[in-house]
Image (cartoon, grey):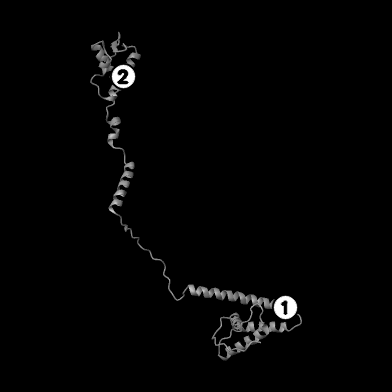
């Protein structure tokens, strides 16, 4: 039989809270509750609360009626309903106990007596705070300069062989060759290139000679020292 106790607790959060306090105080097994003695303790506590003029809500009175009914049923010969009602009460007590433990853990982690302010917009600090040696800065400069050159357009000198050189047409060199041969109908082949230093002009002169030979207007004779000869009628279209 449980010893009669007098709690100095001022308030309970509900009837389940009071039952858990009684079970803990008397070191009872929550899975095997002694309903007969627990009811007496519960009713004594309600009476003490009334004497102290505490507010006894309907929840406490409802639990008292439930416990009294459970005690009455347990005195009957058949206890099937008693076990069912005890299982329901035990389940509620275990669930409430778990909630109290979780609330206590949250209370330790979070303080509800504090004010939380929303994030403020802060201007980023764009200043660079790194520190490097002169050797590291020089190596970084060389690396950046080398990468930069790859993205620069080619210098004008790179196009000098294509753009800056004078373009010489083959037709103009045909006229040149015919004029020379009209003054002197036979001359050395190499003499046609005397004084020509421009690559485009030399190529155009060579192509002009080929065109004139193909057209039957001039002839190229000799293997060692070839000579160019103007054929009959070759000079009619020279100018």
Q: Position of residue 67 (x, y in %)?
A: 66, 83
Assign the N terminus to one quadrant of the image.
Answer: bottom right
Q: Nearer the viewer, residue 25 or 52?
A: 25
39 relative to 9 in the view: left or right: right
Horizontal arrangement in the rendering, residue 100 relative to residue 91 (left or right): left
Residue farthest along the right direction in this orientation: 77
Q: Which residue is mark 1?
A: 81
Q: Position of residue 178 (x, y in %)?
A: 27, 14
> Disc number at residue 223?
none
Where's residue 123, x and y in %?
Answer: 35, 61
Contact, CB < 8 Å: mark 2 with mark 1?
Answer: no
* Horizontal arrangement in the rendering, residue 161 relative to residue 22 (left or right): left
Quadrant into which the C terminus falls: top left
Q: Position of residue 135 (x, y in %)?
A: 29, 51
Disc 2 is placed on an element classified as: helix
Q: Is residue 236 visible?
A: no
Give the vertical position of 72 relative to 231 (above or below): below
Q: Alpha-carbon neighbours of circle 1 within 10 Å: few (<14), some, or many (≥20)?
A: few
Residue visible at 70% across and 76% down?
84
Q: Write the residue at 52% across / 75% down.
A: 104
Mark 1 element type: helix
Q: Which residue corresponds to mark 2? A: 206
Q: Nearer the viewer, residue 116 or 39?
A: 39
């Amino acid at each position: 039989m449980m010893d009669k106790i007098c709690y100095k607790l001022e308030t309970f959060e509900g009837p389940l809270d009071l039952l858990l306090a009684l079970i803990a105080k008397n070191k009872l097994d929550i899975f095997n509750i002694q309903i007969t003695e627990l009811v007496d303790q519960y009713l004594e506590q309600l009476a003490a609360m009334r004497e102290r003029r505490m507010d006894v809500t309907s929840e406490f009175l409802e639990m008292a009626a439930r416990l009294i009914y459970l005690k009455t049923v347990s005195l009957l010969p058949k206890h099937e309903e008693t076990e069912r009602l005890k299982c329901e009460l035990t389940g509620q007590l275990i669930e409430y106990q778990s909630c109290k433990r979780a609330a206590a853990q949250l209370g330790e982690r979070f303080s509800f007596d504090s004010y939380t302010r929303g994030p403020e917009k802060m201007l980023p600090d764009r200043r660079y705070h790194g520190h490097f040696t002169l050797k590291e800065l020089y190596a970084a400069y060389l690396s950046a300069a080398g990468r930069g050159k790859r993205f620069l357009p080619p210098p004008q000198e790179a196009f000098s062989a294509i753009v800056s050189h004078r373009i010489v047409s083959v037709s103009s060199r045909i006229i040149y060759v015919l004029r020379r041969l009209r003054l002197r109908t036979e001359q050395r082949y190499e003499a046609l290139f005397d004084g020509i230093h421009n690559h485009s002009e030399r190529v155009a002169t060579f192509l002009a000679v080929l065109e004139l030979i193909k057209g039957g207007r001039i002839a190229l004779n000799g293997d060692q020292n070839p000579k160019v000869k103007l054929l009959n009628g070759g000079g009619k279209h020279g100018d």
